Image: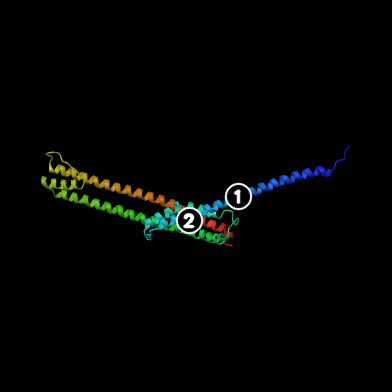
Amino acid sequence: MFPIDDNSLQNPLEDLENLETSDDIESIQELDFSFRQAISILRFLGYALLLFTLFDLADTLTPLQLMNPNWEFQTIGALVEKVVVPLMGFVLIFTGAMTERRRWEMKALGILSWLALIVGLIYCLMLPLGIVNTIRINEINKTQVTSQLDKQTAQIKEVQTQLSSISNEQQLKDLLSVLEKGGIAITPKPGEPVETVKKDLKAFMTGAEERLNNQAKEALSKQSFDLIKRSVKWNIGALIAGVWFIGIWRMTDWARR
């Protein structure tokens, strides 16, 4: 029998183990490289989103109309509707913490972290401003509807007053001509007595006044409902956005060190 050398059996096994280890290391290195590349792309996208947000913010805020409740309310709505873009921008920029950061990013990350806090506080402050503007806009809507209703009601009252003073057919024709110019065309039947026409016209004006009151109530109710619906949506959205931005600030304390 030939002698068996134990070393001759161990060497192939060691070579195989070394080969497997080498393959594992290479796979890990490739995976690590792909991961770093992916992080770089996500961060680049984050910076791009913040840049787009800056341009969009300038467009939204100009021209400034401070103390205008409608402009302030619509601006809050626009900022809330588009808040996902800057939120995604901040999240993508802070992805990977300090891994593979360029030198200029070290200070920039600290600034962006504090900026997230400022933006979060601004969004939280939108809540009371949105509530106040909702109340102011609702009062403005009421005033406008009431003013328009009073004007139209006054016109109806004037016609009713003129009806009371009509005593002949010519005066009635003159009144009907005026009403026709105002968009109300009423044609009495041939030979119909003046008093009968006056009675029908008076009933028509009374019905018109009731219709105007009902239309005004419906318009005001619809305006109030739409206003409250948007107010709830935008105010709650502003609060949620504020909490998210403040949360980003709290979770990026490593960037401020």
Residue depicted at x 31% and y 48%: 217
Crowdedness of circle 1 by 10 Å Cα count: few (<14), some, many (20+)? few
Residue depicted at x 24% and y 46%: 208
Asked whether, in this view, residue 122 is left or right of residue 186, the answer is right
Disc 1: which residue: 35
Whether residue 168 can be seen here = no
Crowdedness of circle 2 by 10 Å Cα count: few (<14), some, many (20+)? some
Between 235 and 252, the one lying in front of the other is 252
Q: Is residue 117 placed above or below 178 in the rendered structure?
A: below
Q: Secondary structure at mark 2?
A: helix
Q: Residue 118, how many percent across, how many down?
A: 49, 60
Asked whether, in this view, residue 67 is left or right of residue 241, the answer is left
Between 86 and 242, the one lying in front of the other is 86
Q: CA distance from mark 1 to mark 2?
A: 25 Å
Colouring of the image: rainbow
**Marks 1 and 2, the one that precedes in the sequence:** 1
Disc 2: which residue: 51
Q: What residue type is disc 2 on?
A: Leu
Image quadrant where one finds the N terminus = top right
Q: Residue 183, how many percent across, how many down?
A: 21, 46
Residue that lies at the very extreme toward the right in this rendered image: 1
Residue that lies at the very extreme toward the top in this rendered image: 1
Q: What residue type is disc 1 on?
A: Phe
Asked whether, in this view, residue 113 is left or right of residue 189, the answer is right
